[in-house]
Amino acid sequence: MTKKFSEDNLKEIYDQLFDKSAELILKYEDAQVVASTLMAQAIRLYKTILTPQEFEEMLEVVLNTSKQVEPFIFHKLH
């Protein structure tokens, strides 16, 4: 990442993408399709902006930290 972002900026981006993802999951009723589409776009973005070495290192970090990822907990509204 070449530009430094504040925590507020990163939270805003995260929240906007989360909201759009939730909207698409509700619309298409398939979280796996939404997740795989987001993953494909993320990988393409990384492949575009990183060197081949950086790209491979990033994928290794993703694999090596996969057990630390927490699932979303959704609360149903009544």
Image (tube, rainbow, N blue to C red):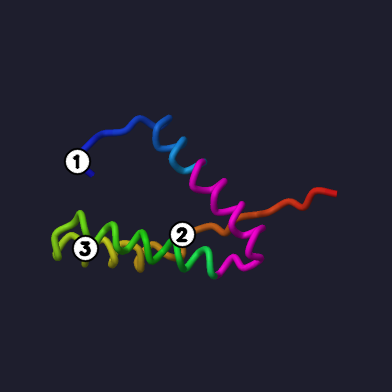
Q: CA distance from mark 2 to mark 1?
A: 26 Å
Residue drawn at 23 percent across, 44 percent down: 1
Amino acid at dot 2: Gln
Q: CA distance from mark 3 to mark 2?
A: 20 Å
Rendered view: 7 above or below 43: above
Few, some or many C-alpha atoms within 10 Å of disc 1 (few <14, some 14-19, many ≥20)?
few
Circles 3 and 2, Cβ within 8 Å, touching? The answer is no
Few, some or many C-alpha atoms within 10 Å of disc 2 (few <14, some 14-19, many ≥20)?
few
Determine which of the numbered discs, if any, sits on residue 55 in the image.
3
The quadrant holding residue 39 is: bottom left
* Relative image position of residue 33 (x, y in whole percent): 53, 69
* Relative image position of residue 29 (x, y in whole percent): 66, 65
Few, some or many C-alpha atoms within 10 Å of disc 3 (few <14, some 14-19, many ≥20)?
some
Circles 3 and 1, Cβ within 8 Å, touching? The answer is no
Q: Is residue 26 left or right of residue 1?
A: right
Residue drawn at 53 percent across, 64 percent down: 34
* Relative image position of residue 74 (x, y in whole percent): 68, 54
Q: CA distance from mark 3 to mark 1?
A: 15 Å
Lower sequence index among marks 3 and 1: 1
Q: Which residue is mark 2?
A: 68
Q: Nearer the viewer, mark 2 or mark 1?
A: 1
Residue drawn at 26 percent across, 61 percent down: 58
Rendered view: 17 above or below 35: above
Determine which of the numbered discs, if any, sits on residue 2 in the image.
1
Lower sequence index among marks 3 and 2: 3
Lower sequence index among marks 2 and 1: 1
Q: Nearer the viewer, mark 3 or mark 2?
A: 3
Q: Which residues are magenta?
A: 16-32
Q: Is residue 74 left or right of residue 67?
A: right
Q: Is residue 28 left or right of residue 46?
A: right
Residue situated furthest front in the rendering = 27
The quadrant holding residue 57 is: bottom left
